[in-house]
Image: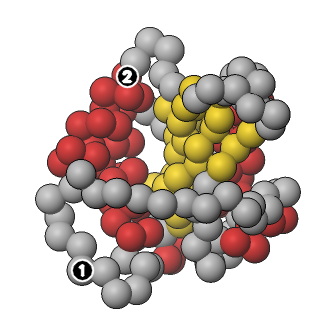
Amino acid sequence: MRRATPDDADELVRLRAVLLRTFPGRAWNDDWREPARASLLRRLSAPEPALAGFVVENPDGPGLAACAVGVVDEHLGNPYSPDGRVGYVFNVVTDPGARRRGYSRACLEALLQWFRDQDVRVADLKASPDGEPLYTSLGFARTSDPAMRLRL
């Protein structure tokens, strides 16, 4: 397990596509891939990145077996995060042929430590049914906060 670099951008996008295919009822096109790759390249290359990714190399061949990516966002403070800094976890995924080996757990634990090193007190994520057991084992809990979205 290691920290992701700009050289991992293509594989991080590939693994994101693996994750997106797990959501039923969605017909994804590939229009998102190049903008996502460009964003990863820019953000992983920043001198003091507010985005971090942790990856596991595929032991059975080329590419990555798993990853976890996160960002530090800054909002107005609140009782859970007085300074308003919140970690957001996304893109936790393991390639189907490499599952059940602890790779996503290792990546996520490293990401959570990175948040702690950044003095982040709260981390949020959206859990898929497959990922929820991992997240709850690490202390994540469902919240009562309603989430809404507007497509602009």
At 24% from the left edge and 37% from the top edge, which residue is drawn?
38
In the structure shown, which secondary structural element does the residue marked by tag 2 occupy?
helix
- Circle 1 sits in a helix, a strand or a loop, which is it? loop
- Crowd band around label 2 with a 10 angstrom C-alpha radius: few (<14), some (14–19), many (20+): some
Q: Nearer the viewer, residue 128 or 55?
A: 128
Q: Is residue 115 visible?
A: yes
Residue drawn 59% across and 44% down? Answer: 88
Question: In screen coordinates, is 22 left or right of 66?
Answer: left
The residue at which mark 2 appears reads as: 45
Choose top left, top right, bottom left or bottom right for residue 137: bottom right
What's the mark number on residue 142? none
List the residue tagged with mark 1: 27
Which quarter of the rendered picture does the N terminus lie within? top right
Q: CA distance from mark 2 to mark 1?
A: 31 Å
**How far across and down, in percent of the image, does residue 22 sit?**
44, 79
Q: Residues within 10 Å of mark 1 (few under 14, many from 20)?
A: few
Q: Which residue type carries mark 1?
A: Ala
Front-most of 62 and 109?
Answer: 109
Quadrant of res 40: top left
Q: Is residue 124 above or below residue 127?
A: above
Q: Residue furthest bottom?
A: 25
Colour scheme: secondary structure
Q: Is residue 9 above or below residue 121?
A: below
- Residue 30 picture location, percent across and down: 17, 64
In this rendering, is residue 22 above or below 105? below
- Say which of 70 and 124 sits in front: 124
Q: Residue at x 61, y 55 (%)?
A: 125
- Please state if 78 lies on the left or on the right of 61 as rendered: right
Q: Earlier in the sequence, mark 2 or mark 1?
A: 1
Mark 2 or mark 1, whichever is nearer to me: 1
Q: Amino acid at mark 2?
A: Ser
Provide residue 120's location: percent of width, then percent of height: 72, 29
